[in-house]
Amino acid sequence: MDEQQGRGDTATALVRSGTRAASSVPAAPALPEIRLTPPYQDAIPPLDAAQITEIRNEQGCSIGEVGGPDEYDAVQLETGRTLILLACGTGAYNVTHVALVAERRNGRLSVRRAEFDEPSDKEDAALTNAHWDGERRLLTDSPYGRGLGDCGSRSEYAWDGTRFRLVRREEMEECRGARNFITTWRARVVRP
């Protein structure tokens, strides 16, 4: 990474630091921009137990796989669209969630798997330890390699009206007690 970024032999290098001036490091390229949708203006459509059971069946996500209560979170993404984070499996320290987008069409609830702009690891819309940050309007995904939380990855996604776009990713592949993950992707969020 130091070589790719032109940081080798400088004080800013992660691994091979040196005496070259930090000013010799080339400027970072401009960050890609992701535009958020305008804030929502309607209420979250209510979901009852029968609807959640139906959604679970449609998604192939049985309550027995969750290993706990039948939990889900529903948050408004934008006017007319709701994000449903459906708990769909658990491990020792990770909970798998399926990310769904719900909207009412002709008085009927329509639910589909959320789309993500990154490669195949999110094609099934499965997230780990998912959380919606309502203040920042970002969806987080934090799969940990072990309970200490010292390895794995942390990702943030912004809703652009069509799909979730990767805004930030930090990774630490080795479980060695390091709490400082390395940032491997960044984008700039543009708020309406």
Image (cartoon, grey):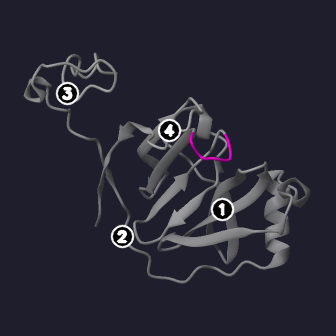
Report the Cα–Cα distance between label 1 and label 3. Answer: 43 Å
Q: Are marks 4 and 3 in contact (CB under 8 Å)?
A: no
Total marks drawn? 4
Magenta stretch?
146-150
Which residue is more in the foreground, 31 or 79?
31
Report the Cα–Cα distance between label 3 and label 2. Answer: 42 Å
What residue would you read off at disc 4? Answer: 178
Q: Tag 4 or tag 2, which sits nearer the N-term?
A: 2
Q: Tag 1 or tag 4, which sits nearer the N-term?
A: 1
Residue 32: name its quadrant. Answer: top left
The x, y position of residue 123, in whole percent, is 62, 39
What residue would you read off at disc 3? Answer: 11
Kindly report which numbered mark, 4 or 1, lies closer to the viewer in this rendering. 4
Kindly report which numbered mark, 3 or 2, lies closer to the viewer in this rendering. 3
Q: Secondary structure at mark 1?
A: strand
Which residue is more in the foreground, 121 or 16?
16
Residue density around tag 4, few if under 14, some if 14–19, many if 20 or more, within 10 Å: few
What residue would you read off at disc 1? Answer: 85
Q: Tag 3 or tag 1, which sits nearer the N-term?
A: 3
Kindly report which numbered mark, 2 or 4, lies closer to the viewer in this rendering. 4
The x, y position of residue 63, in whole percent, is 87, 60
The x, y position of residue 37, in whole percent, is 38, 64
Q: Tag 3 or tag 4, which sits nearer the N-term?
A: 3
> Can residue 104 be seen in this snapshot?
no
